[in-house]
Amino acid sequence: MRSVVNLTVHGIGPPGRPFEPDEELTWVSVERFEQVLDAVAGREDVRITFDDGNASDVEIALPRLLERGLRAEFFVLAGLLGEPGRLDAGGVRELVRAGMNVGSHGWAHRDWRRLDPAQARQELDDSHRVLTGLTGRPVSRVAIPFGSYDRRVLGRLRRARVSRAYTSDGGRARPDSWLQPRTSLRHDLDLDWTRRVLDDRPSLPLRARRIAARAVKRARG
């Protein structure tokens, strides 16, 4: 497999809690979510991920994934478990029992470029400890909140022995890369949007611009 498409789902259906700023842009209807699942079923070059630990992960997404024989990776905010509209500890365990993978989205949905030392410990050390305890498995993969990273963030992740880090940079990825770009589902997606994302074959200039933008993020800080 030469490359993969990593999709990110945030929330589905009724939110069950107030939106964070601009969160409504990545919150999709049940119908649109099902359209995407039907489009990716049977495709080995597509990975499905979920961010934020929303209650819809279990209530809406999980049964629809299982119906189609799909697996996904759920990146949970460990410090927000049990809050209104969020997963609780039982929901995390249910995902694991269903054969899904669970990773960390941090502790409290903070920008990792702007952490003080105590917050950094919460976001990486404490979140991994809590999720490892809930899942019974070592948690070593992360999804970077807001896709906000720089060389200091990446260095911190390396020192924390993170085995894979997912971003929000868009585009396809090499299957075994440590840093994995992802594309978020949008509230207004349609079948044309889905086809473009799944079958994205960018021109050389566009590919070069994407590579350059990621290089700038990796170097800054």
Image: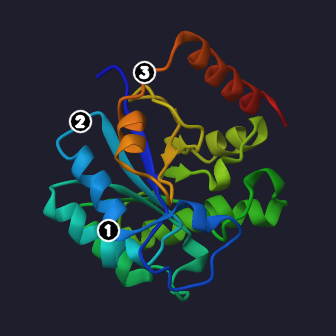
* Separation of marks 3 and 1 at Cα, in angstroms: 28 Å
Type of amino acid under label 1: Ala
Which numbered tag is attached to residue 121? none
* Separation of marks 2 and 3 at Cα, in angstroms: 17 Å
Q: Say whether residue 93 is visible.
A: no
Above or below for 38 versus 131: above
Q: Nearer the viewer, mark 2 or mark 3?
A: 3
Residue 111 lies, in percent from the top left, at 74, 57
Residue 59 figure quarter: bottom left
Type of amino acid under label 2: Glu
Q: Say whether residue 16 is visible.
A: yes
Q: Residue furthest top?
A: 204
Q: Nearer the viewer, mark 3 or mark 1?
A: 3
Which numbered tag is attached to residue 201? 3
Residue 151 figure quarter: top right
Q: Depth check: give the residue in front, 113 or 12.
A: 12
Q: Earlier in the sequence, mark 3 or mark 1?
A: 1
Residue occupying image coordinates x 58% and y 43% = 167
Secondary structure of the residue carrying numbered label 2: loop
Residue 213 figure quarter: top right
- Residue hosting label 1: 61
Residue 98 lies, in percent from the top left, at 22, 67
Where is the N terminus found, in terms of image quarters?
top left
Residue occupying image coordinates x 76% and y 27% = 216
Secondary structure of the residue carrying numbered label 1: helix
Secondary structure of the residue carrying numbered label 3: loop
